[in-house]
Image (tube, grey):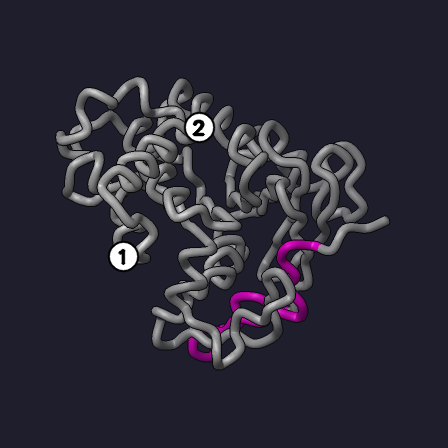
Amino acid sequence: MQKTPLISAKDVDVFYAKKQALDKITLDIPEHKVTSLIGPSGCGKTTFLRCINRMNDLVDICRVAGEIKIMGQDIYAPEVDVVALRANVGMVFQKPNPFPKSIFDNVAYGPKIHGLAKTKGDMEEMVEWSLRKAGLWEEVKDRLAETGTGLSGGQQQRLCIARAIAVKPKVILMDEPCSALDPIATAIIEELIDELRKKFTIIIVTHSMQQAARVSQRTAFFHMGILVESGATKSLFTAPQDERTQNYITGRIG
């Protein structure tokens, strides 16, 4: 029996002024899996990702049409509270962007603004839980008062992941989370992604097909604003249905 997808996008169009960036994207995202969005630069991967937490709302000239549902709720319905939506759909960006605050305050920020911790003890527990889940606790537990910007690039990205998961979102969006990192830091983040999917649903935009093959169970291939095909990662890479997918995977287009 097919499980109901956690996220369901139907006929999503995105326009920046008159330029169409996405054309009729229909894609289901299953729960507790990692779904990779791959494709050449400028093909619409990040634009689609940003539709899922309504980050495109922040761009004046951007217009989104179609339907995106999370757990059956249309996230573009007029009654939707965008702040609550973004608490449920965390985001990790390409470049680590810790706040210029202490390591502790970086992670405590979300729980604080959403009123999730009743006591100081609650907050300390949440911060420790998040840092442990992000694989950073052992490295920073004696330095929580130090500034987050003083960490290495890989540690900063894990701090941003800890910050994203502190409010216990349903979904984590990752926009090329390893592109600014060295291979060792990348390997640590990839291991972490595999661990995190037990608790969260993860959608990752990646330029690296090797990374998509390593970390994701599902892959969607975008090209020139359309979704060419999507499916189980292994079958998409070994037996793509569409010639454009085949050409991209073998490096003929890119």
Amino acid type at circle 1 is: Ile
Q: Residues within 10 Å of mark 2 (few under 14, many from 20)?
A: many
Q: Is residue 16 magenta?
A: yes
Q: How many marks?
A: 2
Please state which of residues 26 and 139 is positioned toward the viewer in this rendering: 139
Which-is-in-front pick, marks 2 and 1? 1
> Is 43 located above or below residue 253 in the figure?
below
Q: Is residue 151 magenta?
A: no
Q: Residue at x 14, y 34 (%)?
A: 147
Looking at this rendering, what residue extends furthest in the right direction? Answer: 1
Q: Considering the image in quadrants, where does the C terminus appear?
A: top right
Q: Main secondary structure of the magenta part?
A: strand
> Is 99 located above or below residue 44 in the figure?
above
Q: Quadrant of residue 146?
A: top left
Image x and y of residue 18, in percent: 47, 79
Residues drawn in magenta? 5-23
Counting residues from the start of the chain, the first of labels 2 and 1 encountered is 1
In the image, 56: left or right of 239?
left
Q: Quadrant of residue 101?
A: top left
Q: Residue at x 31, y 50 (%)?
A: 110
For disc 1, the marked residue is 113
Please state which of residues 195 and 126 is positioned toward the viewer in this rendering: 126
Image x and y of residue 235, in percent: 78, 36
Q: Secondary structure at mark 2?
A: helix
Please state which of residues 232 and 242 is positioned toward the viewer in this rendering: 232
> Is 12 located above or below residue 46 in the figure?
below
Query: What is the CA distance from the residue labelled 2 to the residue labelled 1?
Result: 27 Å
Q: Residue at x 32, y 31 (%)?
A: 128
Amino acid type at circle 2 is: Ile
Q: Residues within 10 Å of mark 1 (few under 14, many from 20)?
A: few
Q: Residue at x 69, y 41 (%)?
A: 247
For disc 2, the marked residue is 189
